[in-house]
Amino acid sequence: MTSTTSRLLVLLSLLQARRDWPGGLLAERLDISHRTVRRDIDRLRGMGYRIQATKGPDGGYRLDAGAELPPLLFDDDQAVALAVALQAAAVRGAGVEEAAVRALTTVRQVMPSRLRHRLDALTFTTIPDGRNTAVQPVDPVVLLSVSAAVRGRETLRFDYGDHDDRPPRRVEPHHLVVAAERWYLFGWDLDRDDWRTFRVDRMRPRTPNGRRFEPRPVPGGDVRAFVSARFKGSAGAGDWPCHGSAILHLPASAVLPFAGDAVVDDLGDGRCRIHVGSWSWVALAASLGRFDAAMEDVQPAELREAFGVLAGRYAVGGR
């Protein structure tokens, strides 16, 4: 073999291919001595792979608990990247959610304990926004520090933003959240006595962490719904504070690709009714204007009034 590393990868692949391997057959397949086989097995065990010695006339080896793992080796940074990617894929709505969860479980089984602890410490919640855009990077040291505090139920103290002259924030960290292209910490702000979200890229944690705490129940019991509602400016369960509808003189097929989280009813005759929400009535009116189509039966009255507000603003701006 060209190197010990490549030989170890081939050995892992062989161990996965069948349940039991006689030592002599492994030596023959790899074109090495029995002594080198034993050394390579010890190397793999040192990396955390569970390889059992089997008894019998020829003796042999069995890869235990991780037989389905692809023959890959990961350094620390790769293990963190893998955990982030698989956990994000599990809620991205790309059709691979179940496979991502199974892949993360399988990888964890055969990782060395040092890496397994880091994988266990990195847990977060992803809120898909339908834009399929890349998440803004954050300092991995800060990310791991915050995640460890979430897992350990330890109060976080951190400076936030550019205000170095202010006392540090004190927060009971509840969840790491990925939403709107950014990492957020969701937790109970001890000084504001309320649930808050914080951008992780603006956090500078202080050490050591504070006291341990018992997690408070999230209103409604669903972190994703509650945080989504906060991002939308609503105090409800993941809903927009303003809702309206209108009939658009466009076929549903032309509206659906740009409807986002709106509901579109096909009315036939080249028309459809769109049900949409937003954080204010004026914003809702503006969102309907992007379809550049005639409208009728706009509901409710607040939405009709918002169109008047927009018309006035546009008239002044166009002078």
Image (tube, rainbow, N blue to C red):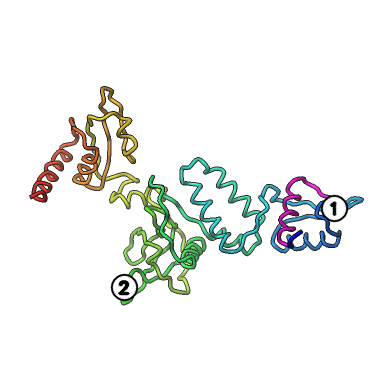
Query: What label does residue 296 carry, if any?
Result: none
Q: Nearer the viewer, residue 220 or 88?
A: 88
User: Label 1 sits on what residue type?
Assistant: Glu
Query: Which residues lie in the magenta part?
Result: 4-26
Q: In the image, is 319 to the left or to the right of 271?
A: left
Q: How packed is label 2: few (under 14 Cα within 10 Å), some, or many (20 or more)?
A: few
Q: Quadrant of residue 189?
A: bottom left
Q: Is residue 34 left or right of residue 260?
A: right
| Residue 277 percent across, percent down from the top left | 27, 41
Q: Which residue is mark 1?
A: 28
Give whichever of 71, 199 is nearer the camera.
71
Assign the magenta stretch its main secondary structure: helix
307 with respect to 25 (left or right): left
Secondary structure beneath disc 2?
loop
Question: What kind of residue is marked 2?
Answer: His
The answer to if 186 sits in the magenta stretch is: no
In the rendered image, residue 9 lying in the magenta stretch gets the answer yes
Cα distance in 3D space between marks 2 and 1: 66 Å
Can you identify the residue that label 2 sits on? Answer: 163
- Residue 101, position as x, y percentages in the image: 56, 47
> Most extreme residue toward the front, as rendered?
2
When the figure is inspected, residue 209 is found, relative to residue 68, above or below; the finding is: below
